[in-house]
Amino acid sequence: MVQIASVFSMRHFFVLSLALNVSFILRSVFEREQGLNWFGFESEKERITQRTRLSVSSSHSSITTLAEAQDSGERIINLDHGDPTMYEKYWQQMGDKTTVVIPGWQSMSYFSDISNICWFLEPEFAKQVVRLHKVVGNAVTDGRHIVVGTGSSQLYLAALFALSPSDASEPISVVSQAPYYSSYPSMTDCLKSGLYKWAGEAHNFSKEGPYIELVTSPNNPDGTARHSVVNRNKGTLLHDLAYYWPQYTPISSPADHELMLFTVSKSTGHAGMRIGWAIVKDKEVAKRMTKFVELNTIGVSKDSQIRAAKVLKAISDTYEHVDDSEVGETFFDFSYHNMAERWKLLREAVEHSGMFSLPKFPPAFCTFFNQVSEPRPAFAWLKCEKDIEDCETFLRGHKILTRGGKHFGVGPKYVRISMIDRDENFIRFVKRLSTIRI
């Protein structure tokens, strides 16, 4: 008996525990497809809200379960980028509901609506943006102007252009609280503009005069709720709310700021569309942002806007017609349970390894789901403990690619890890992370 006990170490029990978790997920998928809830009986409320945790690939040739995935440690796991391929499964299930056919003669003009400040904004896309925000309750849209861009990245530069004084003797300072989004510094300074200049960590900013402060909430990379830090006269705030959606964080109230940025890449997972939108209170700021996009790309792809409108409409339809038996599972419920299960598995792996730590998030009431829940960020802000000083290099040695803390304005003991990759990649990552030892 002593020999048997020594063979079955805590590591074996941990792997067995994870395997059982995944088997439960597979069972829940089967029961969902049979029209049952997790407990084997039908409930109208649960039919709408109880969804799968981790999705399973529709291809039987692809092995994605933790219990079956073979990981020799030689395969490179790339979780550096926030490529939202986790959502592919949901949109495959939606079938033709988001299919768009565009005739060759359609959308040939530069112009969409010449009566709108943003003259290249497709009316149907604007309509569906406003509709989705009302369904979710995460942003005020009444009395605001919508400016569309080629992703929120273009809109970020358009906002800097619009908010910078055109007659200033020197570039306006742009700051953000660390850890900040890794691309902010390079995007701000890439053109060496005479209008604006990256000035680093907001807590360290002491220069007098006008400034622009970026507030990303929930924050990329650490998932925390953020507020402005500098809070001085002559300051202008730019809110990046790309992750203020219910699958990532509890929705507390509609965001009501002067200028707010959103994107389909993180809200619906359609990064390849390259579509984002800004909700702008000030008319003149909206005009200047539109002018920037005009000068930069002479508008935004109509084809992408039409497709994005179709996707946003499909999401809103599932919530406004929940009694329709043909609706299927709702997008945010699917996404919420996927993110919750992934965070559960990651925390178990971190605890088992003993080499790392993760931030803890306070629960809060979500007005969308009408329940108390914890944030489930799109990125994990992982810290290497013990004597590991460079976490990115350490994990690269285990063939796990991440983005180190130095890119976010902090030390190298931290890394950002994408939580929204495909199931197979994420499951391999969790399994490998749990086995890492010095």
Image (cartoon, rainbow, N blue to C red):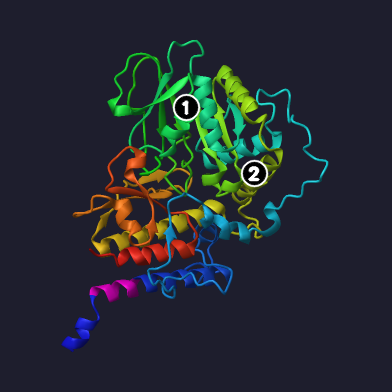
Which residue is label 2 attached to? Answer: 308
Placement of 108 over or under 371, stated as above or below: above
Return the residue nearer the eye: 214 or 169: 169
Placement of 139 over or under 47, stated as above or below: above
Residue 140 visible in the current orientation = no
Does 179 appear in magenta?
Answer: no
- Most frequent secondary structure within the magenta stretch: helix
Residue 176 visible in the current orientation = yes
Numbered range of the magenta stretch: 10-17
| Residue plotted at (65% across, 60% down) | 325
Quadrant that contains the N terminus: bottom left
Q: Secondary structure at mark 1?
A: loop
Amino acid identity at mark 1: His
Where residue 326 sits in the image (x, y, percent)?
66, 59
Q: Earlier in the sequence, mark 1 or mark 2?
A: 1
| Residue plotted at (34% across, 75% down) | 16
Q: Which mark is residue 257?
A: 1
In the picture, measured across the screen, residue 414 lies left or right of residue 302, that is left
Return the residue nearer the eye: 232 or 97: 232
Q: Residues within 10 Å of mark 2 (few under 14, many from 20)?
A: many
Amino acid identity at mark 2: Ala
